């Protein structure tokens, strides 16, 4: 059994990780930490777990946390700029980590520091960390000590755009991405209130202002060898969970739609969690780990329209984190995720 | 023209008041105060008002606020226990007030202090304040200096129960009331987040624990001369606005349903904002000032089932406040409200 | 392995059954029938199942359907009055059935025929059919050939009321029950449209007019030996799935709340899918098979307030159906359901 | 007073027209027709109008309908391909018409017949009909006998794109438009059910497959003198009403953002119902007739990002229809709409 720890597990990604790991046949939850709730049972904080697990939150300073005889892998659910400190310590202890924060996603330390407005404490580890998108970096993930789990918007856009970027001559990309509000986390803010989200639709941090924009551009480059310009338009729609991106890919020359579909089919045919579909919607990927992709006829031969949908908390966060763990430990990639 | 001021107008009830008064043919907004936004335009805080009004928030300490040559009536939208201080001052200046807080709703000062856990600063004014439910206290409202605008749950339950209590022999009442989340106001809390409210239904402060329970019992007594026991079950449902109560009225002896319907018809036939209906839903009262009431066959001759529905922000707050103003100033009771 | 067939599986209960059985360690789906979709893959109709199962819908007339060498148990998801014909045939073939329709829930054939306005074709089987509420009839279920899976409202109300009815002196019961719209099924109607449900709350078939009312009264009588009067107020709230009932139980004499809580604790302590909780909401039971129950202080010693919550599609339908199957076949009652 | 008739008024646009006209100081509703509800009161079909209006639906064959002594203008809310027959008759009687259907929007009769798969009965009237977008065709509207009220998606996209197309060198346009479900009307379909829309997001008829795509291209050409290619991606989001389009305008050469903003400011400064804003969301335009527009920094100097938002039932349908009526009859363009 893989013994997994969860750091900062009282948020939405922690809750999903617990749910997945309880169904996993080869993994078990060793501990879950929470500064705020240490000493309380998980079921007290998330009552859906009553009669399901009697795990209690412990403090991250507990000595079990970084003890290799207790834990094989640690999922880090701390906020950006805070996570790196813990990841560094785990690395020094030789414990493998899946970091759900952004701290090890961007390799270019200058870029990271510009985007997250914080000096990186472990720039040397950035090179060792692997971007945890199995469809692009499976082999590296299998051997990684630190896996930087991708952002939800990044997962959705990269999976939709990568085959085109790799296989065709792309001029530039627009990703118009709509997300449920759970991506904003569990902390109350004016913009996450029911009266703000319900019956509303709002773009925010558009163009190149959202932190996932440089993450996507860099990961696409590393994954396909091609640089592209990206306009990225994140938007909130009134949903709890789920995300759908309409991706407009401008090509240097006209390409036949059937040829494009073939490129996508070949690229993803062996992937356990990517489905090419003619019927795309958020519903089909809600509460599961799939990324659904539809290649559409844009009506303009020089522009591809690719629609990509995921559950932001699963393939966009905790589901992908467990998929990465499965790859790291050589167990069935789908375990816990179907 | 009636010149109206609004104190603490940057919340949801303030926003509705502004909207109503902009449509009123006999009233005008003299000022709107906000501690937080003084100096900003109303449209900056509520962008829906851009190109509609260029009013700016002023500070409540501004000397115009309590100046009789500037304002004929003041709507007070301050929090409970804070509102009374302002209301007292306005009273001393001889300016009429519609207080949307709970501070002058309960006449029994001991009860008020128990429920709101605060010493009342103006117990002598409690007697002068009139409970602003036009259907029960229209004459008193017309002469009142201080109108205590009822709570939303109280309005919904009292209008549904009063005719039965007044005209039949009632043993006890249960009001099972479902509210949209806007009743909780504009301040972000864990329970007002989209991820908490959406796809959920939760009772809270049930039995006799909600502050509107004693308010309802006392107002029903003053309005009908009859005391009743009340079990009150407030609940949140995933809606922005609107409220519906299913009210179970246990009778001392069996009564024929047609007789009950006649009691309700006679009681409400002349009321401009109460509609007896066979088709009840929150939709029918949303964004208007009506209270819809349906007398149902409970299947048990000793129990009446009365369903009552309002918009919590209109008939349950700002709409009723303007209805009260209209009565106080002798203009058409429906002005601004259709 | 238990080989399970699903009849009429292209609706919401069929979809949930497939999802549960795919996770079940001791059961497998032998076939799913659908008149409309025979020949199509399940994934074509429910795209969420793409890459998860390649089962195809077959026609109910297919000879495998009633073949004991193919199937050990059949879940019947046909409409009321239609289901009985299939159930009768399966019974004659000696195949055990869990019937999710209402056709075998009410034992009193006259009552059934009055409520469902259809002559019952197998009145003699009504006596053999067991009401599939494990908490009241587990032993009978274990031996049953026909299990009549309870209605969602019935499950929610009965589990909330039964311990009081059995252990205390009850005068009458009111159940004020709020349901998500999935209870209305997959067929488009004016009242199931988004524009009808969203931002709305509506009671319907109140008092004794809903078909679950006599079902609840009869099942409570058979389960506790006590008859009670019941006012039942079903309501639609804007949710996909989930249900919460506030149940007012009028007692013949005052009872101490702690004593009541003890009655409930003792009754449910060994039940795998009933949780007594202090924190009740629809969220906690959504997407799981639990019934959460909270005994509340109504403020009136002669009236109990019990709140009961389930997922209408799981504990209220397909989850309970699989729980029943687990009991019938002697496997772990929780298999497939956690 | 302008006497207005409404043909086919039992749908969502009819309901909004009635609501607006009841508030209009210079117009009155002469009649509302409905095949299905003739003889019933409007309040029976739309209970929100109880105690507000006692108008009854009449049949469209009633002789008052086309009687110039009864009515000055007729709003036609019939389905596409059906509306033209009525519009033709009204024209022959010399009664002015605002047609909310698509039948007179497209001038090119061949294009109309290709898109709507129906022979046009009055091709000669196509030339006389004016496209009812006041911001582009106000003068023509003021004199028109037939005003073809634009589609909701068309209004939203054209207002967002027209200033750029007119004032800059545009290469091509992508409009990624998200709509509430009320745009689909009042008739129940699988895709308009609550369980289909809630917690979902789905693109449909993308690229050049939606009927508003050619409408937009043609109207932009007539309004600006410039032809452009358009990829149009309509999407459903879980809202009742409201619409927001993110419009990507590819320029032939880089332009400074401040210059673009100036182009928009100059174009719209005198428009009563277009607001340039820095704070854009569906909420701000819900239940009002404004179109809010934000010019964003896309991060790419050769691509403009313009966000445009309207209420699909108001500025996208009935509000704009009344705005057109106001222009046609020379009354205050804002009457009834604030």
Image (cartoon, coloured by chain):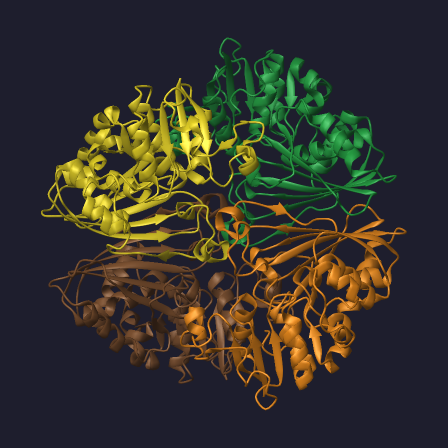
Chain colours: A green, B brown, C yellow, D orange
Residue drawn 41% across the image and 83% down it: B329
Query: Looking at the image, can residue B54 be seen?
Result: no
Foreground residue among C293 and B181: C293
**Residue B54 higher or lower than D309, as above or below:** below
Name of the residue lying farthest toward the top? A69
User: Toward the viewer: C110 or D7?
Assistant: C110
Residue D157 at x, y percent in the picture: 72, 59
Q: Position of residue D325 (x, y in %)?
A: 65, 79
* Residue D4 position (above or below residue C134): below
Between B145 and D308, the one lying in front of the other is D308
Q: Is residue D165 left or right of residue B102?
A: right
Residue D108: % across, % down: 79, 66
Above/below status of A127 relative to D141? above
Q: Quadrant of residue A134?
A: top right
Q: Is residue B28 visible?
A: yes
- Relative side of A251 to A91, left or right: right
Q: With B225 as the anchor, is B22 left or right in this view?
A: right
Residue at x 56%, y 76% (from the top left corner): D6
């Amino acid at each position: 059994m893989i013994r997994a720890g969860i750091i900062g597990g009282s948020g939405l990604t922690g809750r999903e990780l617990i749910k997945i790991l309880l169904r996993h046949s080869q993994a078990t939850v060793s501990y879950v930490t929470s500064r705020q709730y240490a000493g309380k049972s998980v079921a007290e904080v998330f009552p859906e777990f009553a009669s399901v697990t009697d795990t209690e939150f412990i403090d991250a300073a507990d000595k079990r946390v970084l003890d290799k005889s207790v834990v094989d892998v640690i999922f880090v659910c701390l906020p950006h700029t805070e996570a790196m400190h813990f990841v560094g310590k785990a690395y020094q202890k030789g414990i493998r980590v899946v970091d759900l924060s952004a701290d090890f996603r961007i390799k270019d330390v200058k870029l990271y520091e510009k985007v997250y407005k914080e000096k990186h404490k472990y720039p040397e580890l950035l090179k060792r960390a692997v971007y945890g998108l199995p469809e692009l970096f499976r082999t590296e993930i299998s051997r990684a000590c630190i896996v930087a789990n991708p952002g939800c918007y990044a997962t959705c856009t990269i999976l939709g755009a990568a085959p085109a970027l790799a296989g065709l001559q792309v001029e530039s990309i627009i990703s118009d991405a709509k997300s449920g509000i759970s991506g904003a986390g569990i902390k109350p803010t004016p913009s996450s209130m029911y009266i703000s989200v319900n019956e509303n639709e709002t773009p925010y941090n558009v163009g190149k202002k959202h932190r996932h924009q440089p993450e996507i551009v860099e990961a696409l480059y590393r994954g396909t060898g091609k640089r592209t310009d990206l306009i990225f338009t994140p938007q909130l729609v009134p949903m709890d969970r789920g995300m759908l991106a309409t991706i407009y890919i401008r090509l240097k020359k006209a390409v036949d739609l059937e040829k494009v579909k073939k490129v996508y089919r070949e690229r993803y045919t062996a992937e356990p969690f990517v489905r090419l579909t003619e019927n795309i919607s958020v519903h089909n990927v809600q509460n599961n780990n799939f990324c659904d992709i539809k290649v559409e006829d844009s009506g303009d031969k020089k522009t591809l329209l690719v629609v990509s949908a995921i559950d932001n908390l699963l393939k966009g966060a905790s589901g992908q984190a467990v998929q990465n763990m499965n790859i790291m430990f050589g167990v069935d990639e789908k375990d816990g995720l179907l």
